[in-house]
Amino acid sequence: MQSTPQEVSWLREFVFPASFTILGAIIGAALGFSAGQLRDSLKAKKSKKAFITAVSTELEVLEKQLTTMVTSTKESSHELRNGAAGPVFVSRLQSGGYATQIGRLRDVDDLLILKVIHFYSDLSLLEPIIEGVNEMSSNYNRASGAAERNDTRLQLLASIQFTKEHCESTILELQKLRAELTKTSHSN
């Protein structure tokens, strides 16, 4: 069967351009989607690197802060045994970099990121402990009778010792985490 010139014209004028337009739209959409996925992946990698860098830097400062806290608890215990007033410790721990960067991560489905989250979760438990020691110290300083003051001093010494041990174990965990973060940042 022969095609009429009208059928060939219809195919040439409408079907071929329409099919190329549809094909072009499909290819364009696929390329756009792929480019968007690639851009998101690169942005996520950049965010993760920024997170690791910020947390590594912050952990260095935090280690110094906790080491100072351990030294202060040792000195305070010694002074308290010699009749000094109860100590007051700084309870605010460095965590602003973590708090700022964690929200920028695309996902946290990474073992190292989960370890960082777990560390900071555990770290948040230390502040109420320190605040409790400060409150107990305040009670010790207000105690009036010798018996009350002695009982409060013994409780305060035990609390200071607990805080020191908790800071020391936190420092060990922090050092392990910093080593992992350093290893990861150098491998990227």
Image (cartoon, helix red, strand yellow):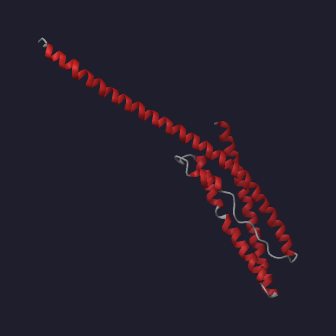
Can you give x and y, in whole percent of width and height, for residue 30 in the image?
A: 39, 32
- In the displayed structure image, the side of residue 25 where residue 38 appears, left or right: right
- The number of numbered discs placed on residues in the rendered structure image is 0
Decide: is 48 above or below 151.
Answer: above
Q: Nearer the viewer, residue 156 or 69?
A: 69
Task: Specify the farthest residue to the right.
Answer: 82
Q: Residue furthest top?
A: 2
| Image quarter of residue 172 | bottom right
Q: Residue furthest bottom?
A: 145
Q: Residue at x 58, y 43 (%)?
A: 47
Residue beneath the point at 25% across and 21% down: 16
Q: Percent x, y for residue 95?
A: 66, 57
| Quadrant assignment, res 5 | top left
- Work out whether residue 33 or residue 67 is closer to the camera in this orientation and state it: 33
Above or below, 60 relative to 168: above
Viewer-proximal residue among 164 and 144: 144
Q: Residue furthest left?
A: 1
Residue depicted at 63% across the width and 53% down the height? 98
Position of residue 7 in the picture relative to residue 95 (left or right): left
Identify the image quadrant of the N terminus. Answer: top left
Residue 141 image position (x, y, % from top left): 78, 80
Q: Is residue 59 above or below residue 23?
A: below
Residue 81 lies, in percent from the top left, at: 85, 75
Q: Residue at x 88, y 75 (%)?
A: 82
Looking at the picture, does residue 58 appear above or below residue 4?
below
Q: Quadrant of the C terminus?
A: top right
